[in-house]
Amino acid sequence: MKRKQPKPMSPYAALNGDDRFAAATKIAATYQLETGQVLFAYMQTIAQISAKHDNDTRLATLQPEIDEQFGKTLQLLRGTK
């Protein structure tokens, strides 16, 4: 019998939980940004992707797309491509 492979953990999943400020602070330090920039950009990314999917807010289904877009946003904010 084949075992199911666990889904890879989102690199930004902590931004969805109670420790979002600590996670945003860590990401901000990595990308040389301010914590507020990271939090605002993440919430905007979620809103845009949710709107694109008829306001679906189930993170389990949207998280891969959120991760991809948010990663691109962080690169743009840092000034690299």
Image (cartoon, rainbow, N blue to C red):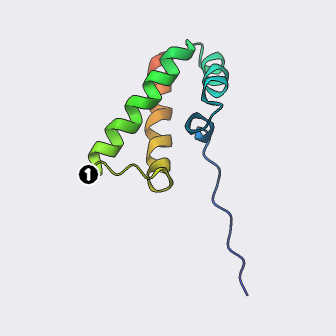
Q: Position of residue 45 (x, y in %)?
A: 40, 34
In this rendering, would 75 be left or right of 46?
right
In this rendering, would 62 be left or right of 2?
left
x 50%, y 33%: residue:
71
Position of 1 relative to 66 (above/below): below
| The quarter of the displayed image where residue 50 is located | top left
Specify whether residue 39 is in view.
yes
**Helix or strand or loop: what does disc 1 sit on?**
loop
Image quarter where the N terminus lies is bottom right
| Mark 1, residue position | 54
x 50%, y 41%: residue:
67
Q: Nearer the viewer, residue 17 or 30?
A: 17
Position of 7 relative to 30 (above/below): below
In this rendering, would 8 be left or right of 75?
right
View extreme (front): residue: 18
Q: Position of residue 79 (x, y in %)?
A: 47, 16
Specify whether residue 81 is in view.
no
Position of 10 relative to 39 (above/below): below
Q: Residues within 10 Å of mark 1 (few under 14, many from 20)?
A: few
